């Protein structure tokens, strides 16, 4: 078998094999290029039929969630989509390595490793030293999942 140079490895394999001497055997190699669509197929959709006339003018929270899920193939996609939505909503991107100038009424976020996003808002009446509340969620790889509540034999819940 012929040796391949580093430059040949960068080319499509069919170009390399077409230059090899042909044998009389019936062995053939069929290389096909994988085609990717520009827009991924929808994983979820919502029905647009509604009895309410205002449903067509007001955006649906369910439709927004389904759009987010369709854009969130992996934790990296979920983070990028959440970042895009936060910037569109007026949040300010912070750098973890810089000093932060947080102001009452401000909305901020930062990302880490392209798969983690932390967003928070400072209340209008916040006074330094009063503490804070945390609401947290996480994305499961490869996408967001709904988890059922499991009851054990004693009646307490476990997740």
Image (cartoon, rainbow, N blue to C red):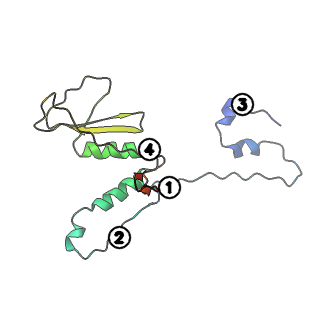
Q: Earlier in the sequence, mark 4 or mark 1?
A: 1
What residue is disc 1 on?
A: 37
Where residue 151 appears, x then y in whole percent? 43, 57
Q: Quadrant of the N terminus?
A: top right
Farthest-out residue, right = 24
Whole-Å distance between the Cαs marked 1 and 3? 32 Å
Q: Nearer the viewer, residue 53 or 145?
A: 145
Work out how far the residue at label 4 is from the one at label 1, CA to CA, in angstroms: 21 Å
The residues tagged by marks 2 and 1 sit, at their Cα atoms, a distance apart of 24 Å
How packed mark 1 is, by other alpha carbons closer than 10 Å (few <14, some 14-19, many 20 or more), is few
Nearer the N terminus, badge 2 or badge 3?
3
Asked whether the residues under the numbered discs 4 and 3 touch, taking CB atoms below 8 Å apart as contact, a structural biologist would say no
Give the mark nearer the N terminus: 2 vs 1.
Answer: 1
Q: Is residue 20 left or right of residue 13?
A: right
Mark in the foreground, 2 or 1: 2
Nearest the viewer among 62 and 129 is 129
Q: Residue at x 41, y 46 (%)?
A: 139
Location of mark 2 (residue)? 47
Tag shown at residue 5: 3
Does label 1 or label 3 sit earlier along the sequence?
3
Give the residue at mark 4: 75
Residue under the point 75% across and 45% down = 18
- Residue 44 in percent (x, y) is at 42, 62
Q: How packed is label 3: few (under 14 Cα within 10 Å), some, or many (20 or more)?
A: few
Q: Which of the two discs, 1 and 3, sits closer to the camera? A: 1
Q: Residue 131, relative to residue 78: is it above or below?
A: above
Q: Which mark is residue 144?
A: none
Secondary structure of the residue carrying tag 1 is loop
Q: Hey, which residue is sitting farthest bottom in the picture?
A: 51
């Amino acid at each position: 078998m012929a040796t391949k140079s580093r430059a040949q490895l960068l080319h499509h394999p069919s170009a390399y094999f077409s230059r090899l001497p042909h044998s009389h055997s019936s062995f053939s190699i069929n290389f096909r290029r994988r085609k990717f669509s520009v827009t991924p197929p929808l994983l979820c959709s919502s029905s647009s039929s509604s009895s309410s006339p205002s449903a067509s003018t007001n955006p649906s929270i369910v439709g927004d969630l389904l759009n987010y899920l369709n854009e969130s193939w992996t934790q990296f996609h979920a983070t990028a989509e959440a970042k895009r939505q936060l910037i569109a909503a007026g949040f300010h991107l912070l750098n973890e390595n810089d000093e932060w100038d947080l102001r009452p009424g401000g909305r901020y976020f930062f990302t880490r490793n392209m798969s983690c996003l932390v967003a928070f808002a400072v209340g209008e009446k916040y006074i330094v030293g009063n503490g804070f509340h945390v609401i947290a969620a996480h994305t499961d790889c490869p996408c967001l999942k709904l988890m059922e509540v499991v009851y054990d034999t004693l009646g307490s819940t476990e997740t």
